[in-house]
Amino acid sequence: MRVLVSGGAGYIGSHTVVQLVAAGHEVVVVDSFANAKPSVVGRLEALTGRPLDVRSFDLTDVDKTEHLFAHEPFDAVIHFAGFKAVGESVEKPLEYYENNLGSTFSLVRAMRRHGVAKLVFSSSATVYGAQAPVPMREDLPTSATNPYGWTKVMQEQVLRDVAASDPTWRIALLRYFNPVGAHASGTIGEDPSDIPNNLMPYLAQVAVGRLEKLLVYGDDYDTVDGTGVRDYIHVEDLAAGHIAALHQLGDTRAPVSTWNLGTGTGTSVLQLLAAFERACGHTLPYEVVARRAGDIAASYADPTRAEAELGWRATRTVDDMCADSWRWQSQNPRGYPEG
């Protein structure tokens, strides 16, 4: 298939691009480089062994999006592009709604005009809100606790309504849990543009000396050790889930399919800290501070639907995730070079 990957230079997108090429697909990347550095392109070309077709523009640009679809054929789209920081979304809600919804509107309109009806959408476990029981199943009601999460809830609804209006659409909504890890080569990985919002890259930057210590937000939750529990999934397993969903769209009868991509196992903050210490070979300083508003005790997936319908399951362990994250960070202590 000829697949358009929006946000294909970003963390999850870049790993998925490598797997798409390995699976024999022709890939075109669109990325604004708002959350990625152009230097990732050369690394992807080195990993895939071929030139990568990259278009640098923002999908909210309706004219450029339309021009791309008017002049080139695509069989399917994987849509990663969007702003993604929860805290920033609280500070800049209008920007998040405008960008995340606007890019999807622009993309789906162009797809509709030019007969491209297969879409794999990057959603999130944030759509389960703060009160969902664990393990979280795809049939739970959706909600959110921040603007970023609401953009995912809203985009899912938009895509369901689009599919309901035209029976030719086939859409996969993939609800990620907590993506971590990096390519086994250490060539590509997660490179936050500022102080990391997520635990694993924060740990990696403490380990490499960029940050002084880990802040543990609360140790009085009703969990195994009092710290928050999350479902961490290796980015390579996550990328494989996209390939499985893309292939399934050709066979599924349902206009919209929703799949959790997670391991089904929760890991606490202190458990992940211990695993990262094993990976990097030394202890890491941390301090317990007050809980953050909006954080919940535990979040982990019920991944049985994805295993049954996609034939997919996460296979990499927490130790694998930490080892690959450390390899990436130790080889790239400042992340990707500029340019």
Image (cartoon, rainbow, N blue to C red):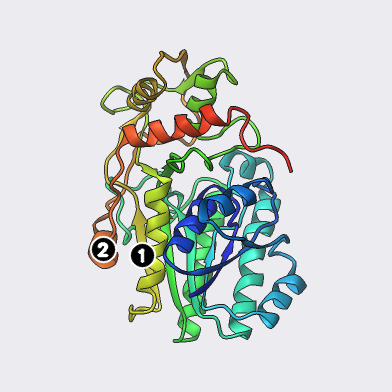
User: Viewer-proximal residue, 3 or 269?
Assistant: 3
**253 up-or-down from 312: above or below:** below
The answer to whether residue 88 is left or right of residue 316 is right
Element class at badge 1: helix
Q: What amino acid is found at the position of numbered circle 2 in the picture?
A: Gly
Tally of numbered discs: 2
Q: Which mark is residue 202?
A: none
Spatial separation of the CA atoms under disc 1 and disc 2: 8 Å
Residue 254 visible in this rendered orientation of the protein? yes
Instruction: Check the picture and name the quadrant holding the C terminus.
Output: top right
Q: Which residue is mark 1?
A: 244
User: Viewer-proximal residue, 253 or 156?
Assistant: 253
Query: Residue at 41% across / 65% down in the picture?
Result: 23
Which residue occupies the extreme front position in the image?
49
Q: Which residue is mark 2?
A: 311
The answer to whether residue 199 is left or right of residue 139 is right
**261 up-or-down from 20: above or below:** above
In the image, residue 264 lies at what x, y percent? 27, 46
In the image, residue 78 lies at what x, y percent? 52, 65
Local crowd size for mark 1, using a 10 Å CA cut-off: few (<14), some (14–19), many (≥20): some
Element class at badge 2: loop
In the image, residue 304 lies at what x, y percent? 24, 57
Query: Residue at 60% across / 37% down in the picture?
Result: 192
Q: What amino acid is found at the position of numbered circle 1 in the picture?
A: Ala
Residue 141 visible in this rendered orientation of the protein? no
Q: Are marks 1 and 2 in contact (CB under 8 Å)?
A: yes
Of callouts 1 and 2, the N-terminal one: 1
Query: Residue at 51% across / 58% down in the picture?
Result: 17
Local crowd size for mark 2, using a 10 Å CA cut-off: few (<14), some (14–19), many (≥20): few
In the image, residue 209 lies at what x, y percent? 56, 17
